[in-house]
Amino acid sequence: MEDQVLRKRRPVSAVVIALNEEHRIAPCLESLSWADEIVVVDSGSVDGTVELAKRYTDKVYTLPWKGFGPQKQAAVDLAAHDIVFNADCDERVTPELAGEIQAILSGDDMLPGYSVPRRTFFGGKEIRHCGWYPDRTVRLFDRRKARFSEDIVHERVVVQGRTGDCRHHMLHYSFSGVSDLLAKLQRYSDLGARQMYERGRRWRLSDLMIRPAYAFLKTYILKLGFLDGYEGWLISKTTAFLTFTKYAKLRDLEKNRTG
């Protein structure tokens, strides 16, 4: 009976994009060992990322950076199987989630896509508020009925049809500490400003004066960030600063390209 179930299971490709992730990629790929293949798309790492990835798969490709959505879709397009699971280098698939996915793949009524909840950690502390939990995102999908959006940041899987919800979690080691948080803030504010500008969004004074304050209040008060202690306060402050920086950079783009 077990052999029959295994024969029925749909094959799945795990896809991962990477850039200078030698400190995190190995545990990520190890947690994907249940997949039928692993596809890694690197965008020009200068550390040991590619060499480490090749220990887990021979499907390692180097492609120029296109933005998060297009880059992840490029990885999906390189996969051998139509059923795809996407993971980031700072994420780990738990054995419980892997077992749940295996059951979905073996079922007769698989939906076009499934969201996965994430337990997110800041340093060694799990963040349960601030809007960081359960942070569901579609990760398992049929590429014939779903694809990544073209967003260069804050990308998402657009699914044609119903989506289901996985019960078990991924572990998301988002930030190792304050330095990591500030470095990512710089990158995401650059990408966010560029994406807004390319879509025709233009800055307003209220973007710099009101939006950052609201971002702090929303994260710290409305989403109960204060219950996460110091880390909740820090996340709320940096969320406000990210909002301010993103719109300040949008203003610079507008002034530099029209001046």
Image (spheres, rainbow, N blue to C red):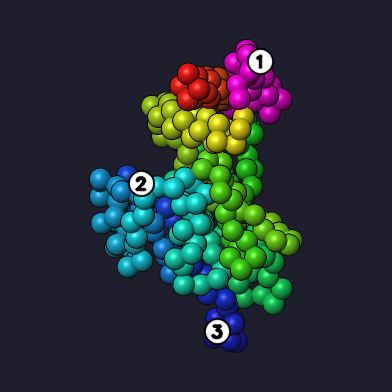
Element under disc 3: helix
Q: Which residues are magenta?
A: 202-231
Q: Give how far apart the Cα atoms at labels 1 and 2 are.
A: 35 Å
Residue located 36% across and 54% down the image: 63
Place of residue 149 in the rendered image (x, y in percent of width and height, measured from the top left):
59, 50
- Please identify the quadrant where the N terminus is shown: bottom right
Q: Is residue 36 left or right of residue 202?
A: left
Query: Which residue is at the front of the view, 119 or 165?
Result: 165
The residue pinned by badge 1 equals: 206
CA neighbours of label 2 inside 10 A, class few (<14), some (14 to 19), many (20+) = some
User: Disc 1 or 2, which lies upstream in sequence?
Assistant: 2
Place of residue 166 in the rendered image (x, y in percent of width and height, measured from the top left):
65, 57
Residue located 60% across and 21% down the image: 203
Query: Which residue is at the front of the view, 131 or 185?
Result: 185
Q: Is residue 7 visible?
A: yes
Q: Give how far apart the Cα atoms at labels 3 and 1 are.
A: 59 Å
The residue pinned by badge 2 equals: 19
Instruction: Please tell me in which quadrant of the rendered image residue 198 appears.
Output: top right
Element under disc 1: helix
- 2 vs 3, front mark: 2
Q: Is residue 33 visible?
A: no
CA neighbours of label 1 inside 10 A, class few (<14), some (14 to 19), many (20+) = few
**Residue 7 numbered tag:** 3
Element under disc 2: loop
Instruction: Please tell me in which quadrant of the rendered image residue 167 appears.
Output: bottom right
Residue type pointed to by label 1: Ser
Q: Residue furthest front?
A: 259
